[in-house]
Image (cartoon, rainbow, N blue to C red):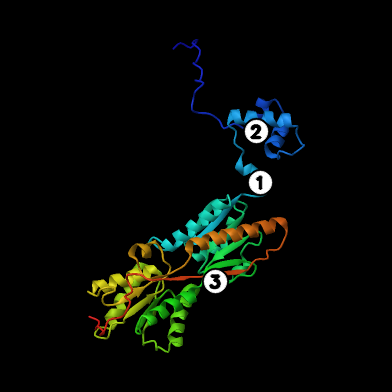
Amino acid sequence: MSASTPKPSQPTNSRRHKLPTLADVAREAGVSDVAASCALNAGKGSTRVSAETRERVLAAAKRLRYLPNATARALSRQRANAIGFVANIAYEEPNLYFQELFNGVVRGATDAQQTTCIFPLSSWDEAPNRIPALCDGRVDGLVVLAPNLEDDSTTWLPLHTPLVTIHAGRQFQGQVNVEADDEAGGFGIVCHMFELGYRRILCVGGPPHNKSADRRVDGFLRAHAENAVEVASDHVIRTWFTVEDGRRVMEKWLQNHRGEPLPEAIFCGNDDIALGCIEALEARGLGVPRDISVAGFDDTLLARRLRMATVRQPLLEMGRHAVNVLMQLIEAQRSGEPYEGPRNIVLPVEIVPGRTLFDCPRNAPLMIP
C-alpha cells in the first residue's frame, strides 16, 4: 500500500464499542446534559423537565442501550445498594456450615435487591483493621459471621455502618445478633437419647471458649442433671469443628480407654466432628449404629446425605433473617429513626432422627478393642 493510499475506515459493525454516556444520550435527544439527567433520574411525576422532553430522552437512551453508571448513582444517593458478608475462612476443609449460611445471606440480599460482597478473613486478628476498612462506602452494611469475635470489639467496630452478627461470641452494644438455640439443641438430642434408653453417652464437643460450642455442652450436661444420669468420668472432650479433629480426638480417646466399656452413644458438637468420630470408630472395626450410635449438630448437607441423626439449625433462615434485620438497620439510620427491634434474635432448633442413632442401645456393652 503506497503512502498516498488512504487508510481503510473502521468497519461500522466493529465489536469494539464504547459504552454510551449520559452526554451521548443528551446529544441524541437534542437536550442538555442536565435535562437528560433529570429525565432519567426523576420520577414520572417530576416537573423538572416536560413530559415531552422526558419521552425524547428515554427513547434516545433506549436506542443507544444506555445504562446508568451504578457507582455514580450510588455516590449521588449515598447508597451502594450492596451489603458485605464477613467470615473467617480458617480451615482447609470445605465449611458446609458457612456455605449454607452464606446461601441464606445471598437469598436475603436477592429478595432485598442488594448486591452481596464477600470479605474473607484468614484470622480474627485481622478484624480490628480489616472490618473498619470495609466500611468506606462500598457497602451499606455488614453481616458478620462472628463466633470468635470476642475481644474489645466495641472500640473499633464502625458506628457509621450498620452491622448484624451471626452467632457472635459476645453481644456488642448497639449491634444486632442472630443465632440458633444451641443449648436447647444439646439438651434436646441428649434427652431424646435418654428416652430411647441410652445412658452412657460420650460428648465430643466443639472448641472451649466458643460460645456456641460451650452452650451445646451445657445442654448435654443439663440433660444429664435433669434426668438424674451421672456423666461418666472423662466423657466430655473438646476439639475443633472439623472432620480431621473429630477423627483425631476419637482415635486418641479410644486408645486411652482400650479394654473399657464402649459408650452406648456419642453426641458431637457439629456434623463434621460426628463424621470424624464415625471414621475413627469404623477404623477400629466398630459399626455405627450397630455397636455405637452417633449424633451431630447443624444438619448440613453432609448430615443430610449420610442421613445422620443431628440437631437442625435453620442455617438458611439465619442468613436470610440477618439480611432482613440489616436492611431495617440501614433504613433506620437513613431516616434518622431508632431501630426498635430485638437486639438478640434466637431461632429454634429441631431434633432430626437418623440412621446413625438406633432406637435402642445394645443389650450388652462392648469392650473397646
Q: Residues within 10 Å of mark 1 (few under 14, many from 20)?
A: few
Name the residue located 74 percent from the left edge and 39 percent from the top edge: 45
Q: Mark 1 or 2 closer to N-term?
A: 2
Identified by mark 2, the residue type is Leu
How far apart marks 2 and 3 lie (CA) works out to 48 Å
The residue carrying mark 2 is: 22
Left or right: 335, with 254 as reference point: right
The residue carrying mark 1 is: 75
How many circles with numbers are drawn on the protein? 3
How far apart marks 1 and 2 lie (CA) works out to 16 Å
Q: Mark 2 or 3 closer to N-term?
A: 2
Q: Mark 1 or 3 closer to N-term?
A: 1
The residue lying toward the viewer, choosing from 336 and 292, is 292
Q: Quadrant of residue 162?
A: bottom right
Identified by mark 3, the residue type is Glu
Name the residue located 48 percent from the left edge and 58 percent from the top edge: 102
Q: Quadrant of residue 90?
A: bottom left
Name the residue located 59 percent from the left edge and 68 percent from the top edge: 153
The residue lying toward the viewer, choosing from 316 and 157, is 316
Q: Quadrant of residue 246?
A: bottom left
Left or right: 289, with 237 as reference point: left
Dot 3 falls on a residue whose secondary structure is loop
**Cβ atoms at labels 1 and 3 below 8 Å apart:** no
Dot 2 falls on a residue whose secondary structure is helix
79 w.r.t. 88: above or below: above
The residue lying toward the viewer, choosing from 124 and 315, is 315
Give coordinates of residue 267: x percent, y percent: 38, 76
How far apart marks 1 and 3 lie (CA) works out to 34 Å
132 w.r.t. 364: above or below: above
Q: Residues within 10 Å of mark 3 (few under 14, many from 20)?
A: some
Q: Identify the disc placed on residue 150.
A: 3
Name the residue located 65 percent from the left edge and 66 percent from the top edge: 341
